[in-house]
Image (cartoon, helix red, strand yellow):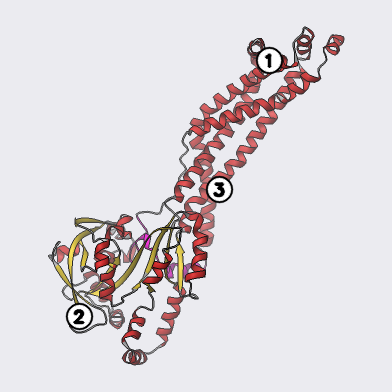
Amino acid sequence: MRSIRRGFRSFRRHPARNLIVVLLLFVCLTFSLSMLSVKLAADSQTKTVKQRVGNYGELRSSSNFMMSMFQRERAKSETERAKEARSMSEEERLQERARTLIPEDLADSFSRDGYIITYDKVLTAGISLPEITNTELANMLGFSKEIKDSAAASGISNNTFVFEGNCNGASAADFINGNKKLVAGSFYTYADYRQANPVVLIEKNLAEENDLGVGNTIEASVNDKTGKDAKVNLEIVGIYETVQAERQSQQGIFGSFNPAGNKFFAPLSVVQTVNNTPGYVELGSYYFDNVDHTAELQDTFNSEIADGDKWEFLTDSQQYELIADPLQKVGKTSMIGLAGALGACALIILLAMAIIIGGRTRELGVLKAIGATDGQVIAQHAVEVICICLVAVILAMGVTAIIGQSMGNWLMSGSRNEQNQDSEEDASGMSSMISMLTERNLYKEGGLFSSAGPEEESSRLQVVYQGSLLLYAILILLAISLLGMAIPVIWITRLKPARVLSIE
């Protein structure tokens, strides 16, 4: 206790000298703790991002396969196509209709991978409703005779509507990401999918224009089928509102063309029936645990599912990278800054202790001459060093709480500038233009004719005071204090009282 009291008195007796050391340590520790708080915030947010982005994938026909198939069909004449159609058997017609689709069994088998948490199956098709006119599509077809003739050759008319089928209405991407919301009735359920109940969701404006409501029925024509089985009556069980319509109205010349506003939602099995493609889906939609297992899922696809370039497995890992990369770069930069600042702290405390202990040789020699042990003298200086470091750490913690967010914003601005430069470089060139024209949205973004969610999520660093920061500050305090005692320990153990007295 006597050594501890002497240490406190020594700390108070030399305010000017200690103040200089405290200020130098304060500056370096403030920078260190600011970098540490930014690093902790970046790691925490990256972990949070992993839970909601980068964990989605879908199995579907590849863009290359669809493009090659389109080119082959384009090379044929109308006569050749008609001749092929007449000579096809029923099974061959099914294969022809499903050539851009994937077998439903294939989507089910991929879902059994251990990393998959939940999945859905989706089919989008153009279905004719003889009693209802698609006004927006009719306006588009009226632009020119060429457009109308081309659409007619593909089976598209003024009565054609987009039907989207999945296993559960509430889990349809448009409803999950907020592009659409239910305003009346209810969603169809998984039981409706399993039992192929002929139910459907209709868009609010379309329902009002045709005096339709919940409980009414509409008649749909089955694609490529004639006779008594060519019509199916669908009961309206819910009415939805297109939330994204206002955003789409601001998207330039095609803003007024919003076929998604006239989209019908129905159980997958019902859409398979009216599209006349039983056993086939457009894509399998999968959510897995996190982005870290993307490579494993891709390997599973390549080894067990892939059939040349016919199918592909796409993920939203690019969206994850856009959000997480700036955070990860900030984390790495802050670690470099933290290491540099802690190195400066170590150098300051070592030099300060060397100067202080060198100027107090006489005092130390006298203490040892009157009977003080090495341990007592070392304990006195340990208390003095701890007091200096403690004051510096307390001040640094307070300032860090104030400037931590500003430091994070500064680092994030530099990271975003680098990302923007990379994006500008990637966006140039003919290949990027072709990619923009041929790229298809992921289903989680809303699928066909839908924009990619309300807005693209951007990374924003929120630096908040965390309890772990206090723990790290205590560890830094102990480390610096122990390091600061290195020179006093060596000096005191080697100091001989007789040598000091002889000098005096």
Badge number at residue 229: 2
Crowdedness near tag 3: few (<14), some (14–19) or many (≥20) residues, C-alpha within 10 Å:
some
Which is in the foreground here, disc 1 or disc 2? 2
Instruction: Please identify the quadrant where the N terminus is shown.
Output: top right
Residue 320: image location, x then y, percent = 47, 54
Residue at figure coordinates x 52%, y 33% from the top left: 469
Please, is residue 495 above or below residue 144 in the view? Answer: above
Q: Find the distance from the CA under tag 3 to the CA under tag 2.
A: 60 Å
Q: Is residue 446 magenta?
A: yes
Q: Which of the marked residues, 3 or 1, is nearer the chain's N terminus?
A: 3
Crowdedness near tag 2: few (<14), some (14–19) or many (≥20) residues, C-alpha within 10 Å:
few
Badge number at residue 36: none
* Location of mark 3 (residue): 329
Residue at figure coordinates x 35%, y 74% from the top left: 280
Q: Are marks 3 and 1 in contact (CB under 8 Å)?
A: no
Q: Residue furthest right?
A: 502
Badge number at residue 380: 1
Which is in the foreground here, disc 3 or disc 2? 2
- Three-letter code for the amino acid on which mark 3 is drawn: Lys
Q: Is residue 465 visible?
A: yes
Magenta region = 428-453
